[in-house]
Amino acid sequence: MIVSNKCLINAIEWAGKKINSPQQRFILGLTAIAIQPVIDFTNKNVDKDTREVSAARTSAKIIAGTSVGVLVRWACIKAVNAFSSYELKTDGSKVLQILKKSKKDIFTPALARISDDVTVENFKHLYSNHVKNLGSILATLVMIGTNFLVDVPLTVWLTNKFTKMVKSHDTKAKEVNNEP
């Protein structure tokens, strides 16, 4: 498929430039929390208790996954930024070489020479993309561990809390309606 609609191309370019990885994960989480628990809670193919527990568990998974995902992505991008200071060797407005400022700058790209068309002005944009992309890759690796160490226990804890809340609300509603 070739996208040729100018409005669509502009929207895609804007989103790519303006919405970073943590923000994308947050948007996905908001969409999921608005839709998925409602689907589980209104599923008439299962009994009421199953619907309640399913909606509570789905909500817990979305909140835990989104919270940890946004936090890890944001922290990794900040870490890459903090450990990637550089100095530029230039010839006028042309960038010749990227140099690390110190030994702690482990995420600075070690490029002895870069392409001839990179200027100081467009280097800042390229470098910003480098930090965001490397931070997102690092976050993916970190999240392999946080899935088991943080997401799962947080999901179980939240599921228990939400299930109690739903059951408590159900009990109060029965008392108000004088149901057995």
Image (cartoon, grey):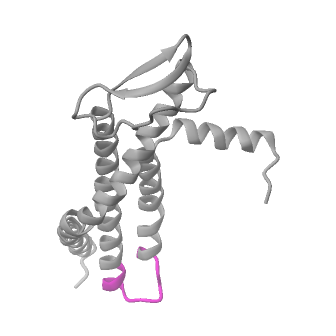
In this orientation, does residue 94 appear?
A: yes
- Position of residue 97 measured from the top left corner of the image (x, y, whole percent): 46, 26
Stretch in magenta: 41-51
Picture layout, residue 179 above or below residue 166: below
* Quarter of the view holding residue 77: top left
Report the residue that reaches farthest toward the front. 112
Q: Residue at x 30, y 53 (%)?
A: 67
Residue at the farthest right position: 4
In the image, residue 116 lies in the stretch drawn in magenta: no
Image point (37%, 27%), residue name: 99
- In the displayed structure, 154 sits above or below 49; it is above
On the image, the x and y values in percent for residue 101 come to 29, 25
User: For the view shown, which residue lies furthest in the top direction?
Assistant: 92
Q: Residue 114: percent from the left, percent from the top?
A: 53, 32
Q: Position of residue 128 (x, y in %)?
A: 46, 32
Residue 146 found in image quarter: bottom left
Residue 19 versus residue 63 in the image, above or below: above
Task: Work out whether residue 107 or residue 89 is closer to the camera in this orientation and state it.
Answer: 89
Q: Quadrant of the C terminus?
A: bottom left
How many discs mark residues in the rendered view?
A: 0
127 horizontally vs 99: left or right: right
Q: Nearer the viewer, residue 107 or 175?
A: 107
Q: Which one is in front, 126 or 44? A: 126
Q: Is residue 48 magenta?
A: yes
Q: Residue at x 24, y 28 (%)?
A: 102
Kindly tell me whether residue 63 is visible in this rendering: no
Give the position of the N terminus as an image quadrant. bottom right
- Residue visible at 37% across and 89% down? 47
